Image (cartoon, rainbow, N blue to C red):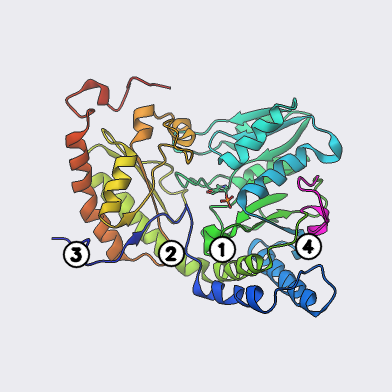
Amino acid sequence: MLAMTASARKRIYFDHSATTQVLPEVLEAMKPYFLDKYGNPSSIHSFGREAKVALEEARKSVAALLNADPMEIVFTSGGTESDNLAIKGAAMYKGRMKGHLITTKVEHHAVLEPMDFLKRFGLEVTIVPVSSDGLVDPGDVEKAIRNDTVLISVMAANNEIGTIQPIREIGKIAQARGIPFHTDAVQAMGKMPIDVKADHIDMLSLSAHKFHGPKGVGALYVKRGTHLEPIIHGGGQERGLRSSTVNVAGVVGLGKAAEIAKRDLEPTSDRMKALRDKMIKAVPELIPRSYVNGHKTKRLVNNASFRFDFIEGEGLVLQLDFKGIATSTGSACSTGSLEPSHVLLALGLTHEQAHGSLRVTLGRENTEEEVGYFLEVLPGVVSKLREISPFNEKTPMGASEGGSCVQ
Ligand code: PLP
């Protein structure tokens, strides 16, 4: 019997890698900067000065989360802008617009697209592969280094499959060769400790809405002495690296979210990890021909990514939504393309396999009861979808190996 019926229960949110709830403490901290303390931090009067003080306090909180110096934090509009600034800014420094960059097959589009953009101007990019559980081999990164390499960018943790990359080893290699190392830590923040000094990181992207701050605000950590060209020109805010009036209320929210992430990292990680492991163990036991995507242990504490033979991920997400459970699929990108996720293909999966994926990403407020409900509901939903699937055990096309679209 189900612990709760769909009608009697509240909705369950299992899509924390897409975005998170703004915590009440964060919202409270932001409110005065919309209503009373609405000055422009560049103004010299008292309104401006109080906004400036708030900005600098937030800068300290973000820096403390990373073991950085506050002056090394540049506020941006989010993870995408931070990635663009790090990549284009390093490549375009002093108008050089030449050289070679290194990244991996499983990066977010916010990294891959700027790299592609630079290729149009003659820069060269090496895209390092990953293992079947999504891990980058630091040796492959080292082998890809050339005399003209201007940047290495490897994400801290993957947004779809949760695999955590060996960024400390890669950072060490980059440092030894004198090449700036950027990491997209958008998914890692608040879920694992990151120390920019110990991890040899020169630039790091983060985004407030992934760890209970507001949307549309983020930061780029830029180690003192890192050469970077701004990509947005104007009034010279953020030490000339990011012009435009800073989103003060948003940045205050980011600062508060960073403070909470640091304060609560251990207890929230332990709780999420226990729930994640319960799901990762139970799903393959409960459902035949179901598998876990990504590394079993080197993965984000909140990420459980699965795939099911003979299933379309979108159908699964919709059926779970009918049952009150919000999840996501890694099988199609956000533009609605029918192309399977580049991350799942990079693991060596066929198109069919990649299409049958389900991403469950936990948050600090999820409970054991919610995970229990999910585990009760999922087998029935999968069976129902398999019954109506044109690809099932009886049709060779549905076989998990060697489908029609082998990559
Ligand atoms: N990088 C990664 C790994 C992400 O998961 C995301 C968002 O999903 C981004 C970058 C983009 O962040 P934002 O939504 O703040 O632009």
Mark seen at residue 52: none
Front label number (2 vs 3): 3
Q: Position of residue 277 (x, y in %)?
A: 35, 55
Can you give x and y, in whole percent of width and height, for residue 149 in the image?
A: 75, 32
Q: CA distance from mark 2 to mark 3?
A: 24 Å
Residue behind mark 1: 214
Q: Earlier in the sequence, mark 4 or mark 1?
A: 4
Q: Earlier in the sequence, mark 2 or mark 3?
A: 3
72 above or below 156? below
- Circle 4/circle 2 CB separation < 8 Å: no
Sequence-wise first label, 1 or 2: 1
Instruction: Looking at the image, tell me whether mark 4 or mark 2 is earlier in sequence order.
Output: 4
Principal secondary structure, stretch drawn in magenta: loop
Identify residue for label 4: 71
Instruction: Kindly report which numbered mark, 3 or 1, lies closer to the viewer in this rendering.
Output: 1
**To which residue does mark 2 refer?**
270
| Distance between mark 4 and mark 3 Cα atoms | 51 Å
Q: Secondary structure beneath disc 3?
A: loop
Q: Can you give x and y, in whole percent of width and height, for residue 209 in the image? A: 54, 59
Q: Between residue 264 and residue 55, name the one nearer to us.
A: 55
Residue 350 visible in rendering: no
Circle 3 residue: 3
**Identity, as a three-letter code, of the amino acid under mark 4:** Met
Magenta part of the protein: which range? Answer: 229-242
Residue at coordinates 31% horizontally, 24% vertically from top-left? 401
Which comes sooner in the sequence, label 3 or label 1? 3
Q: Amino acid at mark 3?
A: Ala
In the rendered structure, does residue 147 fall within the stretch colored magenta?
Answer: no
Q: Residues within 10 Å of mark 1 (few under 14, many from 20)?
A: many
> Quick one: SS at disc 4?
helix
